[in-house]
């Protein structure tokens, strides 16, 4: 069996699908293909991240204290980085499915590796960002709940002493949550894509 025969086993017989393994013909991927589903996941990721970013901006307008601005600016910069990465990957897959001149297997491996690397990087960088996010959220929560100014709030010893505890609790939770969310959004699709890649490589 060759790669084309293996592809036909994976999907029902179709004259269009017979051309997919040839350079320049990846444009006709079926809607249920893992690569197409990954574009949908990236699109959802972009939309949710932008909504979160808008929320950060609104919070900074409501609580314009420099401490809040600093923590949420750092958190917003991380969110922008994630959005930019997702958009770059989304556009790359779109370009692949429209204008690719490379073989299917090469394209699948490229996108699998790039999306996997994007997920690993944002999870690792998140470890350094979560303390700022936790601090900003803690300050905003205190301001909203008490109605005090930030200076008045920071004069409360109990509020200040609890901040390190909040950071120590929320940072690991944020790390675990980010790993879970990435697996939920992209893990299954990446596994399916890797399985397809392995099956095509076995037939070479």
Image (cartoon, grey):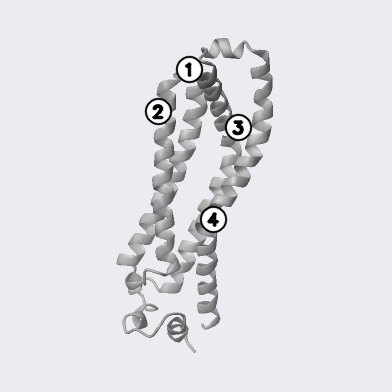
Q: Is residue 127 above or below residue 105?
A: above
Residue 204 x %, y %: 51, 82
Q: Give the Cα separation between the discs numbered 3 and 2.
A: 20 Å
In the rendered structure, which disc, 1 or 2, sits on the residue that comes first in sequence? 2
Question: In the rendering, which numbered label is found on residue 131?
Answer: 3
The mark found on residue 14 in the picture is none
Mark 1 vs mark 2, CA separation in Å: 13 Å
Q: Secondary structure at mark 1?
A: loop
Residue position marked by numbered label 1 in the rendering: 65
Q: Are marks 3 and 4 in contact (CB under 8 Å)?
A: no
- Does 152 sit above or below residue 117? above
* Whether residue 203 is situated above or below residue 134 in the rendered picture: below
Task: Indicate the secondary structure of the residue bearing disc 3.
Answer: helix
Dots 1, 2 in contact, CB < 8 A: no
Q: Nearer the viewer, mark 1 or mark 2?
A: 2
Q: Secondary structure at mark 2?
A: helix
- State which tag comes first along the sequence, 3 or 2: 2
Q: Residue at x 40, y 74 (%)?
A: 103
Q: Earlier in the sequence, mark 2 or mark 4?
A: 2
Residue on which the image places disc 2: 58
Which residue does the image show at 43% across and 65% down from the upper left?
A: 35
The answer to whether the residues at label 1 and label 4 have Cβ atoms under 8 Å apart is no
61 left or right, relative to 130: left
Q: Position of residue 159 (x, y in %)?
A: 64, 18
* Position in image of residue 26 (x %, y %): 36, 72
14 on left or right of 153: left
Query: Who comes first in sequence, dot 1 or dot 4?
Result: 1
Q: Residue at horizontal 65%, vertical 24%?
A: 163
Q: CA distance from mark 2 to mark 4?
A: 28 Å
Whether tag 2 and tag 4 are in contact, CB under 8 A, the answer is no
Q: Quadrant of residue 61?
A: top left
Q: Is 23 on the left or on the right of 193, as rendered?
A: left
């Amino acid at each position: 069996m060759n790669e084309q025969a293996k592809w036909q086993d994976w999907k029902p017989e179709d004259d269009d699908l017979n051309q997919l393994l040839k350079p320049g013909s990846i444009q006709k991927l079926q809607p249920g293909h893992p690569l197409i589903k990954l574009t949908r996941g990236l699109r959802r990721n972009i939309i949710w991240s932008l909504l979160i970013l808008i929320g950060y901006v609104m919070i900074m307008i409501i609580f314009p204290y420099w401490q809040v601005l600093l923590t949420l600016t750092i958190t917003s910069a991380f969110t922008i980085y994630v959005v930019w990465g997702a958009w770059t990957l989304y556009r790359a897959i779109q370009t692949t499915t429209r204008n690719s001149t490379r073989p299917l297997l090469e394209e699948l491996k490229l996108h699998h590796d790039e999306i996997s690397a994007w997920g690993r990087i944002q999870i690792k960088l998140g470890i350094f960002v979560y303390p700022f996010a936790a601090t900003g959220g803690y300050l905003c929560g205190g301001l909203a709940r008490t109605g005090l100014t930030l200076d008045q709030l920071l004069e409360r010893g109990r509020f200040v002493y609890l901040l390190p505890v909040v950071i120590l609790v929320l940072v690991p939770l944020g790390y675990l949550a980010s790993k879970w969310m990435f697996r939920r959004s992209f893990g299954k699709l990446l596994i399916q894509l890797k399985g397809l890649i392995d099956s095509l490589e076995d037939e070479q």
